[in-house]
Amino acid sequence: MAELTSFSYTAGDSLLHRLDARFKIAFVIFISLVGLNAYLWGLGFLTLLLLGIILWTRLPLFSGLKEIRYFLILLLLIFAARVLATDGIPLIDFDYITVSMQGIYNGILVCWRLSLIVMLGFAFISTTPPATIKAAVQWFLKPVPLIPEKKVAVMMGLILRFLPVIFNQAGATAAALKARAVENRKNPLYRLTKFGFPLMRRIFERADDLVIALEARAFTEHRTDPELAASKRDWIALTVVCCLCISLSVM
Amino acid sequence: MHYQRVTRNPQPATRNSQLATRNAQLTTHNPQPATRNPQPDMNIIEIENLSHRFNDGTIGIKDINLGIREGSLVVIVGHNGSGKTTLLRHLNGLLLPSEGVVRLVGVPVEEDLLKARQFVGMMFQDADSQIVGETVYEDVAFGPENLCLERGEVKKRVEKALHVVGLQRLADQRPHLLSGGEKRRLAIAGILSMEPRVIVFDEPFSSLDYPGVKQVLQHILTLNQSGQTIVVATHDPEKIIAHTDRLIIMQAGEIVRDGAPVDIVCDLEAFGVRKPCNCRLGLEAESWQN
């Protein structure tokens, strides 16, 4: 399960750790919105600020980056699509492929914005216990009609809990196939079938086990409400973040 | 074949003091327990003519009659598929009888499933599947939160349960990073925080290394010594047989032997369960704590 260990809660006592989860969710939303509309200078400032906070909080940034390596491939694809799809003064012109300065600029901008949001998510997830994330989501959903906020919060928690199980099962199934020389079979459909069906069966079996475990521990939707408390520190942080967001929007 | 049940394992002085401390922690009972035993001499669990037939028609257990006294440590043995787990799952209503009845201090389980699940805590064979929290603390708090206890009471119970199993320093740890033995201890803490009167262990020693077995065994014995009723189901009685005074052998969903280990241990292999090593050598059963 090493793949998931850095991109999840890391216990600590930093300022980020001590902030109320509701405020942190608000910060993520505000900064993401500002980041999505920011350009190079604004993005540069936000990235440096965020990197500084992450390093100051001593979060495992580099192992976090390693864990999102597949996302980096996605970013690369987005960059390539942007570069190829944007018109402008051509830098490289080869047959039907044209790379323009505007395309490169656009690609960098989009990828940078998405990376900023991922970094925000990393800082948020790493410093907020899942129980308080659930509690905050429940708090935000409470005034929304027709949404069973407690059920949503519990489902969120179960998904978080179940992800490592799925990855473990996938790892075990892949290892079992390799042990029986599946790599000699070049047909990807064959390999996918032999991997996918046992994995799905195992996951459903584990889900069944989880349901029984929940029942054995008297699971109910009507549970003790989570504890959230905003302090002066949270309001100060909110003021600072709001000022920052307004300044960057005006720039 | 000579086989004698040993008396409770004599503990060294230091271990005695540790046990005394833990016993003191454990004997603080739930101020609002699921049900109080109105008659102290009555069986805490009473099973009458219990049968269970699965949806596909397979018979899981058949005509089980069993009484378990409060404070006892009962070991149920049988080979895989003999019906041990099916029987255990009737004790807290995870499975309901096709025929017969299970009573907890005289009250049928199906009358109040929530109370039955508080009354009988269950540790599953695969501790991983029992862990539902994202952190150790959160997992232990899951049960008390389901009981809608006050936040302060939840915190108190979680801290106490973590202290009892020695996991308080790992409260913020993610459960899937724990070792096998630690996961079992976490599962025990999750049960203890609900303050059950009976704790049922389904194959508690499977896939554990020697230190893990010793730790889990120590917790089982400490709980039993503090007055908790314990039921252990296993296909390998070697690790616990020295500590029980009642052994039940199951085969094909039925109870085929029920008595003191000294009287029935020699029959184990006839029912597909390996005799403890010492018994095979004609020696006394020895505790795995030594």
Image (spheres, coloured by chain):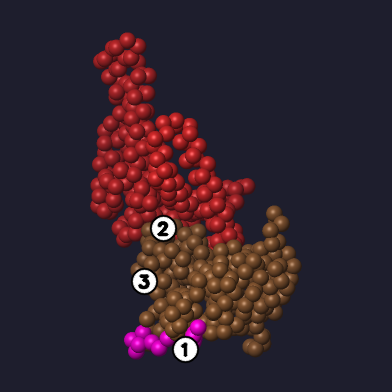
- Disc 3 marks which residue? B211
Furthest-right residue in this view: B99
Secondary structure state at the residue bearing disc 1: loop
- CB atoms of marks 3 and 2 within 8 Å: no
Q: In which quarter of the image is residue B170?
A: bottom left
Residue at the (43%, 49%) spot, across then down:
A172
Q: Which mark is residue B7?
A: 1
Q: Which of marks 3 and 1 is in front?
A: 1
- Sequence-wise, the earlier of marks 3 and 2 is 2
The relative height of residue B32 versus residue B206 in the rendered view (above or below) is: below
Going by the image, does B283 lie left or right of A51?
Answer: right
Name the residue beneath numbered marker 2. B176
Q: Residues within 10 Å of mark 2 (few under 14, many from 20)?
A: many
| Chain painted red | A
Q: Quote the CA–CA distance across marks 3 and 2.
A: 19 Å
Percent across and percent down for residue A207 are 54, 52
Magenta residues, as a range? B1-15
On the image, the x and y values in percent for residue A243 come to 34, 44
Q: Is residue A24 magenta?
A: no
